[in-house]
Image (cartoon, rainbow, N blue to C red):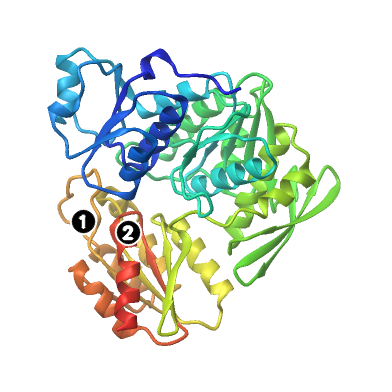
Amino acid sequence: MAPGIPAAMERPHFIGIGGAGMSGIAKILTRRGAKVAGSDSKESATAEALRTLGATVHIGHAAGHLADDATCVVVSSAIRADNPELVRAGDLSIPVVHRSDALASLMDGLRAIAVAGTHGKTTTTSMLAVALTELGLDPSYAIGGDLAGPGTNAAHGEGAIFVAEADESDRSFQKYDPEVAIVLNVELDHHANYASMDEIYDSFETFVGKIVPDGTLVVSADQAGAVELTRRVRDLSAVKVVTYGEAATADVRVHKITQRGLTSEVTVVLNGKYLTFTVSVPGRHYALNAVAALAAGVALGIPAHNLASALGKYTGVKRRLQLKGEAAGVQVIDSYAHHPTEMTADLEAMRGAASDARLLVVFQPHLFSRTQELGTEMGQALALADSSVVLDIYPAREDPIPGITSTLIIDAAQAAGADVIAVHDKERVPEVVAGMAKPGDLVLTMGAGDVTDLGPQILEHLSS
């Protein structure tokens, strides 16, 4: 039986309740019987889904939205100190709880799997959630994206397992005490919060140090940053380290990955035995994510052959190479990739899945700080496409940085031989792309901002 509601969470108020991480926690609390309320900047399907579950959701931020009897106010790192609801919480002496602390409280008493890494977290967490559900284990889960099947980013289950995406961007993953932790990769990102790789490693070491005694770290044997992290934490005698990947030394060794159109067949060697299973999404990186999920489930005592079969039921997450539709012989696919490694992986996956197709990319850079540090690498990644349209930077929570624009990316892409154009008016993009596309082409909308909204509009222009 899953735990009940922590006392501080009986009547929580979420500022930014529609966000991917916040909404998941709100959904679980609502399912557990809490009286959930909150606000978001705009109306959305997520807001309506929360209302359907019984939550009160206000649109816009105003002091009056916060009820006097709220037991806490839940915030993420994106909420600014001058938010009127946060200011009122201070006036009323209502405790303010960070999103990560709220999520940690939901995991108390359960067997937690926390999935961390610079990229791939959402996919791997989702694979585990789907597989464990398929096996009848009824897990709880909180994910940074909506599963393609259930169409939700969170669930309150009656089983003993809680699977959570663990966010390193603001060090909030250090709040969790998992039985199993997955580290997919360790790379320099989130430049507003980390000044160097040493700071990144220190943060991940703290995360690994929070694994419960006799717990397990599942970590990549292939990615350089993860290998270095493994070297640094090998002396944690209370934690078992299980490596996975294509390296000959991996504990769960990938023998072969065979791409078959939009799926992959994966063969691993586990405890001296060969095991083959299907991953129903394209790309080598997704296949490796599935192997990480397999290793984590086995660490919890789930039979490997059962888990491997169940992993084949995973059909994707929204915005992770999600097919939005087809019109005039052109397929439009949406990608959340915003870091150069993710961009390269998704572009290579699409090349492998449809090698004869022309690949057109609509890329929206995410964050000024990320563009400042990685703009050159982003541009180099776009050289994998046949043609690209680059939008202005999506600021999200950041203020502009003087001199930092998408021109950095365009210049790097052109230097790498890429065919790239800038379109500063997002409203013009559907018309521009429809004019470029020909039957048989693939159009990939890519980025972590609102570029995802352009997919349906491009399809509409292609149909007209």
Image mark for residue 404: 1
Instruction: Inspect the image, locate mark 2, and give the three-letter code of the amino acid beneath it.
Output: Gly
From the viewer's side, name the closer residue of 395 and 137. Answer: 137
Tag shown at residue 375: 2
How far from the left and from the top, in percent, is residue 204?
A: 50, 32
Write down the quadrant of residue 5 in the picture.
top left
Say whether disc 1 or disc 2 marks the residue closer to the N-terminus.
2
Q: Residues within 10 Å of mark 1 (few under 14, many from 20)?
A: some
Marks 1/2: CA distance? 9 Å
Q: Secondary structure at mark 1?
A: loop
At a point 38% along the width and 72% down the height, the residue shown is 361
Q: Left of 284 or right of it: where is 66? A: left
x and y percentages locating residue 327 in the rendered image: 40, 80
Q: Which residue occupies the extreme right position in the image?
A: 272
Quarter of the image with the C terminus in it: bottom left
Q: Nearer the viewer, residue 364 or 431?
A: 431
85 vs 458, left or right, is left
Residue 110 appears in view: yes
Q: Do the numbered discs 1 and 2 sit on residues whose CB atoms are within 8 Å? A: yes
Residue name at image x 58 percent, y 72 percent: 352
Where residue 73 appears, as percent x and y from the top left, is 28, 23
Callout 2: SS? helix
Residue depicted at x 34% and y 69%: 456
Which of the image's four quarters has the N terminus? top right
* Whole-percent x, y for residue 273 in the image: 86, 48
Visible residue check, residue 422: no
For disc 2, the neighbor class at 10 Å (few under 14, some 14 to 19, many from 20) is many
